[in-house]
Image (tube, rainbow, N blue to C red):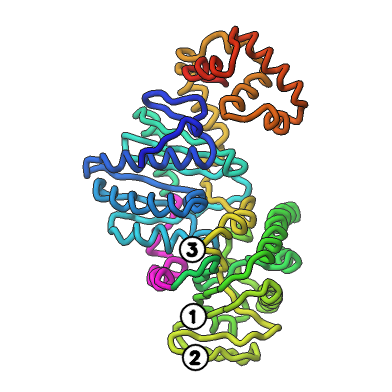
């Protein structure tokens, strides 16, 4: 697991505090955390929470699988692991449930909870702790590449984050109380299905607003007794993701496996239970059947136009939906679905491969988070940590000579240290290449150096703020 690279660091790595940037840096901090677990005494607890349930792992399947296996092995070294999830209200995490979390839970060392707060447009938080020893804290307020990750060994910092974690736990629900969402028997059965490249997998017994037309989505919001301003904010966030998702689905041809026990509800209930997250609600949202059918009809048209090859629906029993004017036919352990343009039964639609980044991320980028109230002032917390905990490090390690650089020059120095060319810096900063070269000459002059090599050497023991 040791393959740490300088490129992922943000100019700082001391004995008890390290700072990383981007997805690659966050993975690196996670590797370091797993290494620390492997050295645990057997009496320690580990604490884990992630607003996106470790979504950033999915961009590298090899890393996801290696880290999962290493994590499971490392659990032998700890007393217990407590995990706070957000996947009870999200379409995001089926892949993790199947490929990541189910094997981890089968170790018998994990106590699972689900966060019970949800607000849109909040920074995404990832927090890993080995009690009283190590803390990894990551905050993502823009894109995943904009994330910043701290790795702490200083005990007082670790203890302060432990308090935050347990405050979050107080506002969570035990995972075993959420059988409607988290039936691991379903997940295990799905995990045994053959996953073709680019296959979609779906399950649970609540519908998702995924691919709900914005016009229908708006009507559902109106039924939730919200202010007009709040409705407008939620509709805007959903519509942006909907447009991108529609484009992405049109690019792919996939096999789809759908696992649902929702058939009876669709045929007899007046209101259909939807997962609340896409409506920015903590709990289920009950949607009028008429609106639900408009949603399913649109979804059918979308699936048909994307040239999907095969759709299977697996249910626990044979179901006839006379109200829907079509019949599900029994075929061994599966029920095959005969297309009908007026109806499409579909539940929790998700890719097991590249589409998790190309599609899901786009859909939920601005509408999914589970940051509790204690963490809503993340920017203030981040700023306070930087001021209080890094102040002495900066004073000790930053040569006075760097104070002569302007903010723009410091930015260019960072880009040079990241290996960016003059042309790349010009494009990034929206200035001409000649202007970049002038800045570089001024930097060299102010720092009394003559080359990039000397700049790297000087910066290797410095923090440039």
Q: Is residue 6 above or below residue 40?
A: above
Question: Residue 227: in sight, yes or no?
Answer: no
Q: Which residue is mark 3?
A: 94
Front-most of residues 177 and 97 = 97
Front-most of residues 376 and 254 = 254
Q: CA distance from mark 3 to mark 1?
A: 16 Å
Label pair 3/2, CB-CB below 8 angstroms: no
Q: Quadrant of residue 209?
A: bottom right
Q: Is residue 192 magenta?
A: yes
- Whichever of callouts 2 and 1 sits on the residue coming sooner in the sequence is 1
Q: Quadrant of the C terminus?
A: top right
Disc 2 secondary structure class: strand
For the residue carrying disc 2, how many other residues have a C-alpha within 10 Å: few (<14), some (14-19), or many (20+)?
some
For the residue carrying disc 3, how many other residues have a C-alpha within 10 Å: few (<14), some (14-19), or many (20+)?
many
Q: Residue at x 41, y 68 (%)?
A: 191
Disc 3 secondary structure class: helix
Left or right side of 195 for 438? right
Residue 330 — which label?
2
- Whichever of callouts 3 and 1 sits on the residue coming sooner in the sequence is 3
Q: CA distance from mark 2 to mark 1?
A: 10 Å
Q: Position of residue 234 (x, y in %)?
A: 69, 55
Left or right side of 192 for 234? right
Q: Quadrant of the N terminus?
A: top left
- Whichever of callouts 3 and 2 sits on the residue coming sooner in the sequence is 3
Q: What segment is highlighted magenta in the picture?
A: 170-193
Q: Which residue is mark 1?
A: 314
Label pair 3/1, CB-CB below 8 angstroms: no
Q: Residue at x 37, y 56 (%)?
A: 112
Q: Residue at x 51, y 15 (%)?
A: 458
Q: Quadrant of residue 455?
A: top right
Q: Is residue 79 above or below residue 278?
A: above
Q: Residue at x 55, y 65 (%)?
A: 198
């Amino acid at each position: 697991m040791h393959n740490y690279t300088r490129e992922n660091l943000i100019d700082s790595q001391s004995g008890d505090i390290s700072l990383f940037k981007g997805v690659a840096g966050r993975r690196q901090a996670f590797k370091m955390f797993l290494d620390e677990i492997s050295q645990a005494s057997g009496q320690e607890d580990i604490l884990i929470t992630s607003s996106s349930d470790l979504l950033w792992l999915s961009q590298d399947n090899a890393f996801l699988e290696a880290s999962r296996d290493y994590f499971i092995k490392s659990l032998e070294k700890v007393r217990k692991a407590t995990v706070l999830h957000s996947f009870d209200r999200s379409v995001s995490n089926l892949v993790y449930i199947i490929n990541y979390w189910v094997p981890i839970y089968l170790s018998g060392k994990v106590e699972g909870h689900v966060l019970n707060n949800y607000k849109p447009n909040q920074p995404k938080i990832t927090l890993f702790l080995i009690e009283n020893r190590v803390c990894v804290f990551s905050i993502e307020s823009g894109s995943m590449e904009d994330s910043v990750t701290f790795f702490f060994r200083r005990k007082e910092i670790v203890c302060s984050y432990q308090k935050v974690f347990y405050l979050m736990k107080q506002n969570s629900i035990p995972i075993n109380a959420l059988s409607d969402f988290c039936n691991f028997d379903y997940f295990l059965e799905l995990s045994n299905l053959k996953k073709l490249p680019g296959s979609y997998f779906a399950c649970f017994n609540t519908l998702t607003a995924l691919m709900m037309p914005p016009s229908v989505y708006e009507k559902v919001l109106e039924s939730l007794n919200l202010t007009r301003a709040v409705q407008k904010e939620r509709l805007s966030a959903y519509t942006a993701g909907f447009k991108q998702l529609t484009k992405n689905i049109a690019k792919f041809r996939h096999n789809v496996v759908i696992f649902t026990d929702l058939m009876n509800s669709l045929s007899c209930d007046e209101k259909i239970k939807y997962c609340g997250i896409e409506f920015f609600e903590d709990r289920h949202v009950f949607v009028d059947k008429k609106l639900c059918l408009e949603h399913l009809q649109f979804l059918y048209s979308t699936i048909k136009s994307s040239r999907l090859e095969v759709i299977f629906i697996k249910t626990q029993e044979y179901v006839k939906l006379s109200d829907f004017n079509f019949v599900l036919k029994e075929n061994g352990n599966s029920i095959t679905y005969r297309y009908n343009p007026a109806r499409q039964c579909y539940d929790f639609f998700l890719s097991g491969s590249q589409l998790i980044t190309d599609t899901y991320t786009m859909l939920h980028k601005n509408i999914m988070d589970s940051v509790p109230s204690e963490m809503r002032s993340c920017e203030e917390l981040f700023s306070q940590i930087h001021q209080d905990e890094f102040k002495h490090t900066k004073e000790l390690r930053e040569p006075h000579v760097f104070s002569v650089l302007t903010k723009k020059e410091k930015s260019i120095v960072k880009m040079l240290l990241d290996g960016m060319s003059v042309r790349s810096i010009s494009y990034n900063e929206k200035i001409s290449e000649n202007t970049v070269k002038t800045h570089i000459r001024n930097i060299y002059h102010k720092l009394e150096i003559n080359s990039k090599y000397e700049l790297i050497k000087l910066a290797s023991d410095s923090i440039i703020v």
